[in-house]
């Protein structure tokens, strides 16, 4: 079984992914792969520099993610141009990993942790999708706690750059409500894991 895991920014998706990994899932993290594909020497980084200029490249040749973020979150067209460069590279590397794991361990549940799963139309690639949910007001609160350098306007901008979390909740096969305490989230994750593990063919 290959499951997609998504949510909104600051909804706690990484927390749920870690819990699933503890329970035995193999988690493929799109954010980690997104960092890998823009390492110095990677073709995607050269393309980003060509499109957005050397201003987004640090002196050591690495990507200045903060500077690039400021550019693309303020301009939807530039964000689309960045996504057109990064998403194919990320998806290709993710699926190479997923295929390798399923070849080595056919019975293992694989969870693909993808922030923009619905936005990029990937939901049909998975056996089901888990959405980690918190209401919009909690999203803003948690994002500002996590990134105190952001203004509230910038936080809203980043949240609005994604599909509305209420819509993701409607589309989900399974929802983990992360608006309570960590133990409440863990109970939901464990209950879902029992269901998923029970349907897995080995």
Image: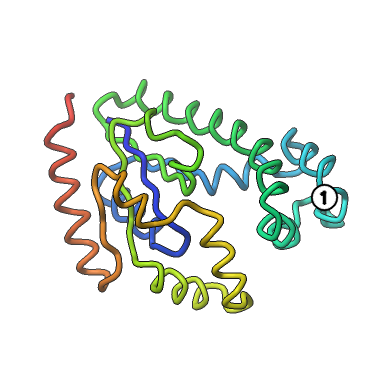
Q: Is residue 97 left or right of residue 13?
A: right
SS for tag 1? loop
Q: Quadrant of the C terminus?
A: top left
Estimate how packed mark 1 is, as few (under 14), some (14 to 19) or many (20 or more) residues with alpha carbons within 10 Å: few
Q: Quadrant of the N terminus?
A: top left
Which residue is at the far top?
Answer: 103
The percent coordinates of residue 57 (x first, y second) are: 82, 53
Q: Quadrant of residue 15?
A: bottom left
- Reply above or below: 91 against 193: above
Q: Is residue 120 left or right of residue 88?
A: left
The percent coordinates of residue 108 (x first, y second) are: 27, 32
Residue position for label 1? 61
Q: Nearer the viewer, residue 136 or 64?
A: 136
The percent coordinates of residue 6 (x first, y second) are: 39, 48
Q: Is residue 190 left or right of residue 98?
A: left
The residue sitting at 24% across, 27% down in the picture is 107
The percent coordinates of residue 10 (x first, y second) are: 45, 64
Q: Quadrant of residue 13?
A: bottom left
Q: Is residue 21 left or right of residue 42?
A: left
The residue sitting at 71% across, 62% down in the picture is 70
The residue sitting at 40% across, 62% down in the picture is 11
The residue sitting at 64% across, 41% down in the picture is 83
Please say which color scheme the image uses: rainbow
Q: Nearer the viewer, residue 60 or 73?
A: 73
Q: Nearer the viewer, residue 105 or 199?
A: 199
- Reply above or below: 168 against 11: above
């Amino acid at each position: 079984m290959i499951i997609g895991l998504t949510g909104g920014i600051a909804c706690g998706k990484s927390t749920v992914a870690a819990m699933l990994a503890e329970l035995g899932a193999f988690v493929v993290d799109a954010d980690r792969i997104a960092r890998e594909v823009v390492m110095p020497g990677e073709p995607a980084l050269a393309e980003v520099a060509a499109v957005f200029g050397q201003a987004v490249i640090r002196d050591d040749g690495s990507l200045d993610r903060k500077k690039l973020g400021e550019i693309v979150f303020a301009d939807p067209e530039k964000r689309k141009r960045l996504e057109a460069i990064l998403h194919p590279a990320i998806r290709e590397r993710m699926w190479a990993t997923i295929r390798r794991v399923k070849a080595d361990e056919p019975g293992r549940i694989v969870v693909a942790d993808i922030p923009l799963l619905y936005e990029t139309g990937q939901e049909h690639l998975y056996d089901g999708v888990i959405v980690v949910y918190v209401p919009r007001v909690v999203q803003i609160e948690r994002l500002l706690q996590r990134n105190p350098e952001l203004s509230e306007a910038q936080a809203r901008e980043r949240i609005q750059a994604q599909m509305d979390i209420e819509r993701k909740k409607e589309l989900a096969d399974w929802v983990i409500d992360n608006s309570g305490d960590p133990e409440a989230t863990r109970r939901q994750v464990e209950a879902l894991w029992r269901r998923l593990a029970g349907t897995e063919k080995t």
